[in-house]
């Protein structure tokens, strides 16, 4: 779908913004991963199994966007995006559980940082980047809204 949109929009619009994912990184095990870190790789260019290759497919889309739009591409790699209307309960559960007393079982390593981004902040930040003409590949660092 991204390749189709690129074919349609190349030459028809001055800028392309692609919302990717931190899953596009080859590894998130190390603390302090930057935008220049290696991207996930597909086993073959014809692979399309999203449930297995989500991050690598996002990385491939990033490459296509950057090859097509060059300095006129903005690629954003957000982490966990949350919103007041999120029906999945994947974030509100942890907030409610953390507010209760007692020990709490949580996934991951205790020393591994987690960044949660409110969709409203991400949208405002993305629009500001587009308006400023910032053609970059970046992981947003937006203010926390709690």
Image: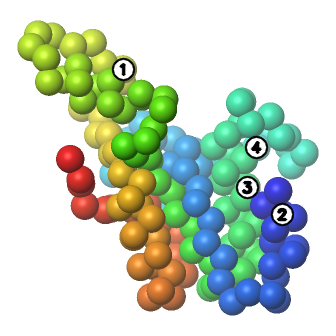
The percent coordinates of residue 119 (x first, y second) are: 42, 54
Which element is circle 2 on? helix
Point out the tag, 2 or 3, that comes first from the N-terminus.
2
**Is the residue under label 3 in contact with that under label 1 (CB below 8 Å)?**
no
**Is the residue under label 2 in contact with that under label 1 (CB below 8 Å)?**
no
Q: Identify which residue is drawn at 74% across, 36% down.
A: 50
Q: Identify which residue is drawn at 30% across, 18% down.
A: 106
The percent coordinates of residue 97 (x first, y second) are: 23, 19
Q: Which residue is mark 2?
A: 3
Left or right side of 38 for 118: left
> Separation of disc 3 and disc 4 at Cα?
8 Å
Q: Is residue 5 above or below residue 131?
A: above
Which element is circle 4 on? loop
**Could you say which is closer to the camera, residue 43 or residue 142?**
142
Comparing marks 2 and 4, which lies closer to the viewer?
Answer: 2
User: Could you say which disc has been placed on residue 107 in the image?
Assistant: 1
Which element is circle 3 on? helix
**Could you say which is closer to the camera, residue 45 or residue 115?**
115
Q: Which residue is mark 4?
A: 42
The percent coordinates of residue 53 (x first, y second) are: 71, 37
**Could you say which is closer to the camera, residue 65 or residue 120?**
120
Point out the tag, 2 or 4, that comes first from the N-terminus.
2
> Separation of disc 1 and disc 4 at Cα?
26 Å
**Is the residue under label 4 in contact with that under label 2 (CB below 8 Å)?**
no
């Amino acid at each position: 779908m991204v390749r189709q949109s690129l074919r349609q929009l190349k030459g028809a619009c001055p800028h392309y913004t692609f919302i990717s994912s931190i899953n596009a990184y080859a590894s998130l095990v190390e603390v302090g991963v930057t935008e220049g870190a290696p991207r996930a790789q597909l086993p073959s260019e014809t692979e399309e199994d999203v449930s297995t290759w989500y991050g690598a497919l996002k990385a491939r889309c990033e490459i296509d966007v950057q090859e097509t739009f060059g300095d006129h591409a903005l690629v954003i790699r957000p982490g966990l995006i949350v919103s007041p209307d999120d029906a999945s309960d994947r974030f509100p559960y942890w907030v409610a559980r953390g507010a209760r007393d007692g020990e709490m079982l949580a996934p991951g390593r205790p020393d591994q940082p987690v960044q949660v981004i409110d969709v409203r902040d991400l949208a405002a930040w993305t629009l500001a980047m587009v308006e400023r003409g910032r053609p970059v590949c970046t992981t947003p660092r937006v203010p926390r809204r709690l």
